[in-house]
């Protein structure tokens, strides 16, 4: 399955925010993360950084959902809080794409909108699958599975290998 729509940055930003909250990054690193994921004007004050940390907790519920119905409920809750409407735009010479809040909204509003909207579109395209939390005990990272077969269970090859070695050693 090919995931190539313009709202993929919102899905990847969602995972990055959740994972950043786990590692408790400082405000400058959070601003760099937003910039890396295409958020324009990513400067944050202390209050905005705290609001995004709280938002990351809400985002985690989508990745941790046990089934499609629970994931749908979690995404709908984000859409209710994080979006103000759907807008088609062509800013900065880009092809037409969707925004879920006006471009002049503050950085927190724009991040909420891009993550909620991106997760909603990805959930539709992936039929409610392909989002998850790492299965390695002790790892709290989340991931977006854009692999060909959709069978990803770990946040990284490192965690998968670590878990495989741990299982092997526990058997011997």
Image (cartoon, grey):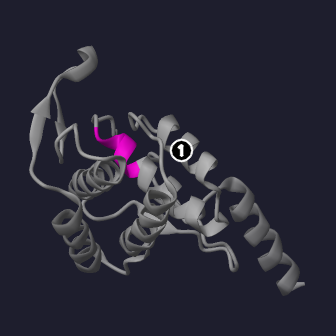
Q: Is residue 115 left or right of residue 48?
A: left
Image quadrant of residue 66? bottom left
Give the image location of residue 116, x and y in percent.
27, 57
Q: Residues within 10 Å of mark 1 (few under 14, many from 20)?
A: some
Observer-nearest of 158 and 91: 91
Q: For mark 1, what is the residue?
A: 31
Q: Is residue 73 left or right of residue 21?
A: left
Give the image location of residue 100, x and y in percent.
18, 47
Q: How many marks?
A: 1
Query: Which residue sits at x=31%, y=56%?
Result: 112
Give the image location of residue 30, x and y in percent.
56, 50
Determine whether the residue tagged by mark 1 lies in a helix, strand or loop. Answer: helix
Image quadrant for the C terminus?
Answer: bottom right
Query: Which residue sits at x=24%, y=45%?
Result: 105
- As displayed, is residue 79 above or below residue 117? below
Q: Which residues are magenta?
A: 7-11
Observer-nearest of 169 and 4: 4
Image quadrant for the N terminus?
Answer: top left
Q: Is residue 71 left or right of residue 23?
A: left
Q: Would you say residue 77 is visible in this rendering? A: yes
Observer-nearest of 129 and 70: 70
Q: Would you say residue 1 is visible in this rendering? A: no
Observer-nearest of 165 and 47: 47
Q: Is residue 86 magenta?
A: no
- As displayed, is residue 123 above or below residue 75? above
- As displayed, is residue 38 above or below residue 126? above
Give the image location of residue 32, x and y in percent.
57, 40
Q: Residue furthest bottom?
A: 171
Query: Which residue sits at x=67%, y=74%?
Result: 136
Q: Is residue 9 magenta?
A: yes
Magenta stretch secondary structure, dominant:
helix
């Amino acid at each position: 399955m090919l995931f190539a729509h313009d709202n993929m940055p919102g899905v990847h930003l969602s995972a990055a925010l959740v994972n950043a909250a786990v590692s408790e990054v400082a405000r400058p690193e959070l601003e760099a993360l937003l910039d890396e994921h295409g958020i324009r004007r990513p400067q944050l004050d202390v209050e905005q950084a705290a609001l995004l940390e709280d938002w990351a907790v809400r985002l985690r519920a989508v990745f941790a959902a046990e089934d499609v119905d629970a994931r749908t409920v979690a995404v709908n809750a984000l859409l209710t809080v994080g979006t103000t409407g759907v807008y088609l735009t062509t800013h900065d010479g880009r092809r037409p794409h969707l925004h879920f809040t006006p471009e002049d909204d503050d950085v927190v509003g724009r991040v909420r909108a891009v993550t909620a909207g991106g997760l909603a579109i990805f959930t539709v395209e992936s039929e409610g699958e392909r989002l998850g939390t790492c299965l390695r005990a002790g790892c709290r990272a989340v991931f977006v599975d854009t692999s060909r077969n959709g069978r990803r269970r770990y946040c990284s090859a490192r965690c998968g290998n670590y878990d495989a070695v741990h299982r092997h050693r526990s058997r011997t």
